[in-house]
Image (cartoon, grey):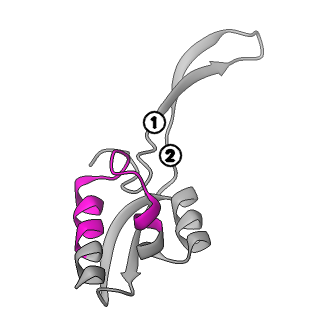
Amino acid sequence: MSRVCELTGKGPMSGNNVSHAHNKTRRRFLPNLNDVTLMSETLGKSFKLRISAAALRSVDHRGGLDAFLAKAKDSELSDKALKIKKEIAKAQTA
C-alpha cells in the first residue's frame, strides 16, 4: 500500500535530519494517513478511503465528500476516488 492520500495526492517528502553538530543525513517526511469511511449523501453509500488528516479537515470544511470531489482536480484523485466522483456526477444528473 503506497503512502499517498487518495483525495489530495499528498505523498512522502524528503529532507534532512540535522544533528547538534550540524551533520545532515537524508530522511523522509511521511503524510499523516488515516483509514476512514466517508458517506456520500447523493449515493447514500459509504466508501473506505486512505486519506491524510489535512484532507479529512478539507472534506469537513467543504461540506462532505460530494462537495469535496466536485471541486477536486481529476489529476490529484486516485482511481478509486475518480470512480466515486463519476458515480456522484452521474447520479446528480439523472
Which residue bears the numbered disc 1? 12
Viewer-closest of 18 and 37: 37
In the shown orientation, is residue 18 left or right of residue 54? right
- N-terminal label among 1 and 2: 1
Region of the chain picked out in magenta, as a range: 68-87
Q: Label 1: state its secondary structure.
A: loop
| Residue at (43, 57) in percent of width and height | 72
Image location of residue 56, percent across then percent down: 53, 65
Label 1 crowd (10 A; few <14 / some 14-19 / many >=20): few
Question: What's the residue at 55%, 77% (across, down)?
Answer: 63
Instruction: Examine the structure image and report whether residue 72 is included in the region drawn in magenta.
Output: yes
Q: How many marks?
A: 2
Q: Nearer the viewer, residue 72 or 33?
A: 72
Question: Callout 2: 10 Å neighbours few (<14), some, many (20+)?
Answer: some
Q: Are marks 1 and 2 in contact (CB under 8 Å)?
A: yes
47 relative to 75, above or below: below
Q: Residue at x 41, y 71 (%)?
A: 36
Q: Which mark is residue 87?
A: none
Chief SS of the magenta region: helix
Q: Residue furthest right?
A: 20
Residue 13 lies, in percent from the top left, at 50, 31
Mark 2 lies on residue: 31
